Image: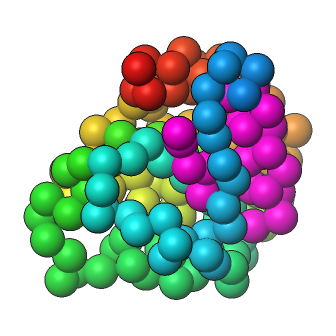
Amino acid sequence: MAVVLYGGELAAEIAERVVVAAKGAGLGADAVNMSDFKKCKLGEEPQTVIFIVQSVENDEPPESAGSCIRFIKKKANAADMFSKMKFSVLGLGDSNLLLDRQTTTAKDCNKVGQAIDKRIEELGGSRICDLGLADERTGLTEVEPYLETLIPALKEALA
């Protein structure tokens, strides 16, 4: 069973798409708001977790994701805290919120997703597919290719 942890309204919609796609592939998956992350016992037991998180103004996480992000980024975390975790991250941003909209990419507006992807790997997590970065300004066109990569990777991770 995979856990799809999401932070933000748009992330909730994408998380539901992931759950539906996973179930369509015969896999178990549950969507959980990052505000309820403690019940997932991150790092305490073997698990596969898909993080879907928005970056909002000033490259901050949505309010509902704040405590989960702080938990992951905590400097006092053990170096192998996530050694039992298989994970993937999809960052959702909006380059319309940036000053220089003409030259920005999905990478520029997804600092939260990039930060947790890096930190989970630093703490021993095993990435099942590459970090996905999507930009609301361009219609989130990056989400579909991410899902096409994620579902087979999820199938392998849960085997």
Which one is in front, 95 or 141? Answer: 141
Point 52% across, 72% down: residue: 39
114 or 82: nearer the eye? Answer: 82
- Predominant secondary structure in magenta? helix
Q: Position of residue 153 (x, y in %)?
A: 48, 21
Residue lying at 49% horizontally and 65% vertically, measured from the top left: 40
Q: Is residue 29 left or right of residue 16?
A: left
**Quarter assignment of residue 135:** top right
In this picture, is 128 found above or below 41?
A: above
Question: Residue 128: which quarter of the image?
Answer: top left
Determine if the magenta segment contains residue 64.
no
Q: Position of residue 129 (x, y in %)?
A: 44, 28
Camera-nearest residue between 152 and 100: 152
Where is 124 relative to 41, above or below? above
Q: Position of residue 31 (x, y in %)?
A: 69, 53
The quadrant of the image that shows the C terminus is top left
Percent across and percent down for residue 116 are 42, 60
Q: Is residue 106 left or right of residue 126?
A: right
Range shown magenta: 1-22
What residue lies at 29% left-to-right and 64% top-to-bottom? 44
Residue 8 belongs to magenta span: yes
Q: Is residue 92 visible?
A: no
Please indicate, yes or no, whether residue 51 appears anywhere in the rendered image: yes
Looking at the image, which residue is at 20% across and 76% down?
77
**157 above or below 90?**
above
| Residue placed furthest toward the left | 79
